């Protein structure tokens, strides 16, 4: 039937008394529960001719060449004359059945049906039919409709365009709109009632905005309805738009179909760590320290392993080297206003790094603002999140699988000695055979503890046996310095990994002797595991500042916990986790801060930290935390997470840089509606095979 948009013919005849006596009508209509066609003199040509058996034929040739021609052949029972009344019908008449043969482009060898002759008149001299009004139905394609020739007998009919709503592939979780227009083609008014969606996949379609409701259409008048398809799964989904009306059938039915595509938007692509900016050497920006109040504009797309298109956000490691005073950096998308947020805080003379996830701005660039003093800035890229399907040419991206924080390695307990300088450790992890092959990267918090000298740590997949010329964190002698990282995995090699051979693994290199802690807070899968989360970046937005009372009214004291409700306005539908930058400001003791979700009955604080700070320091660290359910109209907390401070008193800042949302295409259950609890997440835990020390 061509590009289909469903519509049913309003097939209700109306008594002649309801139509103007001077109005005569020539029309043929044919409709099924899946489509409808109407031909009259406004949209085609009609031909009426008498038959030798006393019946007639009426042919409708539409002007639109894509629409089928309509043909009706009507005959009285054999040996009878066609008069007003109701007849049972066959394709060919016999003594007890009228001939009722109506086709719309295709016909049937045998069919049954019925018809009602509402009026019929003949020429007194020739007995030829001069006017006729018939309602019919036939089993051939389940057709039903109206026939009129020079008749004043009223009827209802509608033309629906398109006759079905069919979308091409739409990314799961995204939406596309189509519009269907209903035009009255009958003599009698057509009145819309309520429109609703029915069918097995009704949840994948909705009616945004206004719809045609209690609208009356006279001949030639139209009303349009917009339908939004938002597939909730991969593959074909179908439903029907049902429009209640004042016809005899009582409704119009329009079939709809959409194919859900497993798109790339929000998925993560790991990259081999590479340096994008080094103001010491002039790479990516002029060779000079960045002055106070200055902004560095950095091209990130189309460089190293970051593609030129299809990038929504990048995961970076940002480092300041040799700042001349204390200050902070703010990293944000080019083209956006500089937000009230910080990405990295630093002290005079200290080399400091932080993981930064930032949306890509105009022309694939980001801006880096320096608040105070002069400093060199380094930027290394670890991966990126897709903004559209362009990266699919490189294969499918991965989804984030948050887990309960779990320690993968602690040199203090595993080795009772430090990771030696200029050496690295291979860290295999075993989530079980069903999971291991799907792991593409680990989301870890890496902490250097009391290093013997100033230096740096680099985390990478371990490929080539040589660390890249990048850094993950920088440490000072005797300090405790954490940083979050998303580290690509490869199978641990059989030569060195022993029982960990073949398991997903990462490598961590240290320039100087240091104790090393590695905590896993989640992993990036291959996009196929159940309940994976995808990322949506945003310009950094401050949601907690205990100095001003934003998010929590007081500084956190020793062993103190704050409960933070995330503003609903900042959360896209389906949000389950937040990507944040958390900062401890001037603590009074050697403390650590931990973030974790406020979940009903699951508020046990994990035995890990998100950041560590010494007295008087201002220290930031990236973190990802799940959030509790949105309780809708119920009492708080809503979309909440908790912040714990270990010792002393500290102010805390939290800047939101993005959200992780449940991808419907791999969700184990439908996304909850407003006010519903989030579905229980799968529990992924691992066994850590022995770590392997490697020297360069």
Image (tube, rainbow, N blue to C red):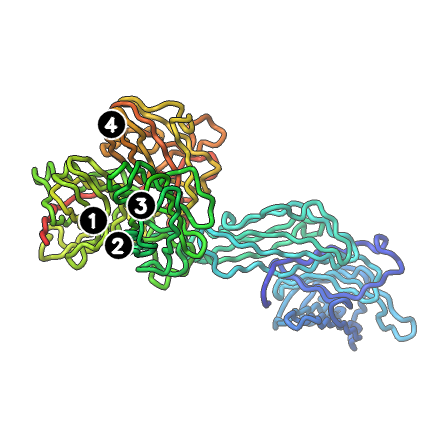
Residues at badges 1 and 3 in contact (C-beta under 8 Å)?
no
Q: Residue under circle 2?
A: 273
Q: For the residues marked 2 and 4, what is the alpha-carbon distance in whole angstroms? A: 33 Å
Mark 1 or mark 3: which comes first in sequence? 3
Determine which residue is flagged by label 3: 401
- Where, quadrant-wise, is the C terminus in this rendering? bottom left
Q: Position of residue 254 (x, y in %)?
A: 60, 56
Horizontal placement of 453 versus 157: left or right? Answer: left
Image quadrant holding the N terminus, namely bottom right
Q: Does 130 appear above or below 545? A: below
Secondary structure at numbered mark 3: strand
Foreground mark, 3 or 4?
4
Viewer-side residue, 586 vs 214: 586
N-terminal label among 3 and 4: 3
Q: Sequence order check: which comes first, mark 2 or mark 4? A: 2
Label ID, residue 458: 1
> Which residue has dot 4 on it?
615
Q: In the rendering, at what x and y percent does residue 533 appear?
A: 36, 46
**Which mark sits nearer the N-terminus, 2 or 3?**
2
Choose the circle earlier in sequence order: 4 or 1.
1
Q: Residue at x 84, y 60 (%)?
A: 152
- Residue 38, by quadrant, is bottom right
Q: Give the left or right position of residue 664, taking residue 561 as reference.
A: right
Measured Cα–Cα span from mark 1 to mark 2: 9 Å
Dots 2, 4 in contact, CB < 8 A = no
How far apart are the alpha carbons under marks 4 and 1?
27 Å
Q: CA distance from mark 1 to mark 3?
A: 23 Å
The CA distance from mark 3 to mark 4 is 35 Å
Cβ atoms at labels 1 and 2 below 8 Å apart = yes
């Amino acid at each position: 039937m061509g590009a289909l948009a469903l519509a049913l013919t309003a097939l209700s005849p109306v008594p002649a008394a309801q139509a103007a006596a001077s109005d005569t009508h020539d029309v043929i209509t044919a409709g099924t529960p899946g489509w409808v066609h109407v031909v009259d003199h406004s949209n085609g040509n009609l031909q009426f001719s008498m038959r030798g058996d006393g019946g007639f034929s009426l042919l409708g040739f539409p002007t639109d060449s894509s629409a089928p021609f309509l043909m009706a052949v009507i005959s009285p029972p054999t040996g009878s004359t066609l008069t007003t009344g109701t007849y049972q019908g066959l394709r060919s008449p016999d003594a007890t059945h009228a001939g009722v043969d109506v086709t719309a482009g295709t016909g049937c060898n045998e069919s049954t049906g019925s018809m009602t002759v509402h009026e019929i008149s003949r020429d007194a001299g020739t007995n030829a039919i001069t006017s006729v009004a018939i309602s019919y139905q036939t089993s051939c394609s389940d057709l039903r409709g109206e026939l009129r020739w020079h008749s004043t007998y009223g009827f209802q009919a509608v033309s629906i365009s398109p006759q079905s709503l069919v979308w091409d592939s739409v990314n799961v979780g995204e939406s596309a709109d189509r519009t269907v227009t209903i035009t009255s083609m009958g003599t009698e008014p057509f009145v819309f009632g309520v429109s609703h969606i029915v069918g097995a996949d009704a949840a994948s379609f909705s009616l945004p905005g206004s719809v045609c409701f209690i609208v009356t259409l006279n001949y030639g008048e139209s009303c349009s309805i917009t339908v939004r398809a938002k597939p909730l799964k991969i593959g074909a989904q179908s439903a029907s738009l049902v429009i209640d009306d004042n016809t005899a059938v009582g409704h119009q039915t329009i079939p709809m179909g959409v194919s859900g595509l497993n798109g790339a938007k929000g998925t993560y692509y790991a990259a081999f760590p590479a340096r994008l900016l080094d103001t010491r050497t002039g790479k990516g920006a002029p060779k000079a320290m960045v002055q106070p109040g200055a902004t560095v504009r950095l091209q990130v797309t189309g460089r190293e392993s970051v593609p030129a298109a299809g990038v929504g956000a990048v995961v970076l490691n940002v480092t300041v080297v040799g700042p001349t005073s204390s200050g902070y950096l703010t990293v944000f998308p080019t083209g956006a206003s500089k937000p009230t947020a910080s990405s990295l805080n630093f002290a005079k003379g200290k080399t400091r790094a932080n993981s930064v996830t930032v949306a890509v701005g105009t022309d694939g660039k980001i801006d880096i603002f320096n608040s105070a003093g002069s400093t060199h800035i380094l930027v290394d890229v670890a991966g990126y999140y897709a903004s559209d399907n362009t990266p699919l040419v490189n294969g499918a991206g991965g989804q984030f699988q948050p887990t309960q924080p779990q320690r993968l390695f602690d040199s203090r307990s595993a080795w009772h000695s430090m990771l030696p300088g200029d050496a690295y450790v291979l860290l295999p992890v075993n989530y079980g055979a069903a999971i291991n092959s799907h792991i593409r990267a680990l989301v870890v918090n890496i902490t250097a503890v009391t290093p013997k000298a100033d230096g740096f740590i680099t985390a990478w997949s371990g490929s080539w046996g040589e660390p890249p010329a990048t850094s993950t964190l920088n440490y000072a002698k005797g300090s405790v310095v954490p940083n979050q990282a998303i580290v690509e995995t490869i199978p641990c090699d059989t030569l060195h990994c022993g029982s960990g051979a073949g398991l997903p693994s990462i490598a961590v290199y240290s320039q100087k002797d240091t104790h090393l802690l590695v905590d896993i807070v989640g992993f990036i899968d291959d996009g196929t595991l159940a309940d994976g989360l995808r990322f949506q970046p945003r310009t950094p937005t401050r949601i907690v500042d205990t100095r001003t009372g934003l998010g929590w009214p007081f500084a956190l004291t020793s062993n103190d916990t704050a409960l933070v409700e995330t503003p609903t306005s900042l959360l896209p539908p389906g949000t389950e986790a937040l990507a944040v930058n958390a900062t401890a400001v001037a603590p009074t003791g050697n403390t650590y801060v931990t973030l974790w979700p406020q979940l009903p009955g699951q508020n046990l604080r994990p035995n890990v930290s998100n950041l560590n700070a010494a007295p008087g320091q201002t220290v930031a660290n990236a973190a990802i935390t799940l959030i509790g359910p949105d309780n809708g109209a119920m009492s708080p907390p809503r979309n909440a997470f908790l912040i714990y401070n270990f010792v002393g008193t500290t102010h805390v800042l939290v800047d939101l840089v993005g959200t992780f949302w449940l991808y419907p295409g791999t969700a184990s259950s439908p996304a909850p509606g407003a006010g519903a609890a989030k579905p229980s997440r799968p529990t992924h835990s691992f066994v850590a095979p022995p770590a392997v020390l490697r020297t360069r």
